[in-house]
Image (tube, grey):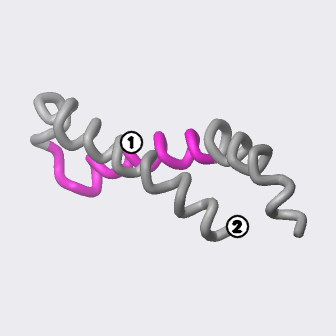
Amino acid sequence: MALLTLAALYPVSVSTSWLFGEALKPWLGHYPMPVRALPQMIVVVLSMTYLVMPAVTRWATGWLRR
């Protein structure tokens, strides 16, 4: 389960880091890092909880049950 979580979390984390670091920099760049990190973590946690991990665990059900 840890390997699946890492494999799923990496692309989500990298893409949200890019989004909040580069694409939204004009709107969020002047805020301190902890304030910029909060919406990014909200997006990561919600997408991992409700989108990514349910799909990944369904895909890997056979492997996880062994």
Residue 50 shown left or right of residue 14 in the figure? right
Q: Tell me which secondary structure the magenta stretch mostly adopts.
A: helix
**Residue at image x 36%, y 42%?**
16
Q: Which residue occupies the foreground of this view, 35 or 21? A: 21
Badge 1 local density, few (<14 within 10 Å), some, or many (20+)? few
Secondary structure, mark 1, is helix
Quadrant, the C terminus:
bottom right
Three-letter code for the amino acid on which mark 1 is drawn: Pro
Q: Given the current orientation, which residue lies at the most extreme right position?
A: 65
Part of the protein shown in magenta: 31-48
Secondary structure, mark 2, is loop
Three-letter code for the amino acid on which mark 2 is drawn: Met
- The residue under label 2 is 1
Badge 2 local density, few (<14 within 10 Å), some, or many (20+)? few
**Cα–Cα span, label 1 and label 2:** 26 Å
x, y percent for residue 3: 61, 68
Residue 65 shown left or right of residue 56 in the figure? right
x, y percent for residue 35: 28, 49
